Image (tube, rainbow, N blue to C red):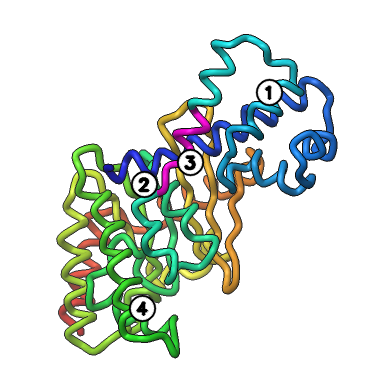
Amino acid sequence: MSAGDSSGSVVRRILLGSHLRRLREARGITREAAGYSIRASESKISRMELGRVSFKTRDVEDLLTLYGITDETERTSLLSLAKEANVAGWWHSYSDVLPSWFPTYVGLEGAAHLIRSYEVQFVHGLLQTEAYAHAVVARGMKGASAADVDRRVALRLERQKYLFAKNAPQFHVVLDEAALRRPYGDREVMRGQLQHLIDVSERPNIRLQVMPFGFGGHSGESGAFTILSFPESDLSDVVYLEQLTSALYLDKREDVLQYESAMKELQQDSPGPDESRDLLRGLLQLS
C-alpha cells in the first residue's frame, strides 16, 4: 500500500463523517437519538462525524436506515467509503511511540496538497535532518529508550518522503529566527541542519522564509500552527495546533480564516525565499 492510499483513508473517514452529519441534521435527528439507534453514546456519534474513529459496517447501515437513505446505489457507495476509510495507515506500526492525537495529523498531512506552517521552537519536522531530529526527539522524550527514540525519528524521516514524491504537496513554511539559533545537538548537527535548509529551499514545491528577530512583533505571536489544504472540494482546510498533552484540529471557517490571515501577514513581513536563503547562509557562516 502506498503512503497516499493510507493517508487517503483518513480523508475518507472525515468525508464520510461529514456526510453522515449532514444526513442526520437534514432529518432533524439529535446525536443522542442517533447514538441510541446504534447502541452507542452521543459522544461516539460526535467522534464518528468528526472522522476520529473507524466505522463499523453495521453502524453505518443502521444510521443510513435511520436517516431514510433507502436507495441501494447511495447506500452501497457510502458503505464502500466506510470500508476504504478503515484502512490502517503506514504509520500504524509506530503507534506505540506516537501520542494518541498524532496519527490523525500524519494522515491529513499526507493527503494535503498544500501545507502552510509557522514554527518558532525548532525546525519543522518535514525539514529536519536525521541528526537534528534525533536531538529534538531525545529532548522531548526524556526517559524513553534509545529504541523508542530511534523509531520516532524513523517516522519523522518517513513523513519527509511526501516532499520528494511524484505528487509532492506545496510546502510553505515560515521559520522564526529563534528556531534557527536555538541549538539542538552539537555544532556539527546545527551546521548540517542549516545546510539542509539551504538545499531543500531550492526545491520548486518548497517556499521557505525566515522571520528575523529584527522585525519585532508579528502575526505569529500565538505560536506555531499548520494549515492543511486538500484537493477534495468538499473537505475544508484544517488548522493544526499542537499542545503539550493534546492537539486541536480547527475547521470552522472563521477560525481557519484568522490563521490564513496570520500566515499571509507572516509571509508578507518576512524576507522572501531568496533573501531568507541568504540569511541562512549567514547563520551557517557564523555557526
Q: State the image coordinates of residue 59 (x, y, percent, origin top left).
A: 66, 34
Q: Label 3 neighbourhood size at 10 Å, few (<14), some (14-19), many (20+)? A: some
Q: Is mark 2 in CB contact (under 8 Å) with mark 1?
A: no
Going by the numbered disc 4, the residue's amino acid type is Asp
Q: Which of marks 2 and 1 is in front?
A: 1
Q: Are marks 4 and 3 in contact (CB under 8 Å)?
A: no
Q: Tell me whether the residue at label 3 lies in contact with that at label 2, contact meaning CB atoms closer than 8 angstroms.
A: no
- Check contact, mark 1 vs mark 3: CB within 8 A: no
- Pick whichever of labels 1 and 4 is earlier in the sequence: 1
Could you tell which of marks 1 and 3 lies nearer the N-terminus?
1
Depth check: give the residue in front, 180 or 276: 180
**Which label's residue is closer to the chain start, 3 or 2?**
3
Please tell me how crowded label 4 is: few (under 14), some (14-19), or many (20+) other residues with Cα within 10 Å. some
Kind of residue at badge 1: Leu
Determine the image quadrant of residue 112: top left
Residue 99 colored in magenta in the image: no
The three-letter code of the residue at mark 2 reads Gly
Which residue is more in the foreground, 157 or 70? 70
The image's mark for residue 64 is 1
Residue at which label 3 appears: 86
Query: Which secondary structure, mark 1?
Result: helix
Q: Residue at x 76, y 44 (%)?
A: 40
Magenta residues, start to end: 81-88
> Mark 4 — residue?
148
Q: Are marks 1 and 4 in contact (CB under 8 Å)?
A: no
The front one of 65 and 148 is 65
Q: Distance between the residues labelled 3 and 2?
A: 16 Å
- Which secondary structure type mostly characterizes the magenta part of the structure? helix
Tell me the number on the disc at residue 110: 2
Distance (Cα) linking label 2 and label 1: 30 Å
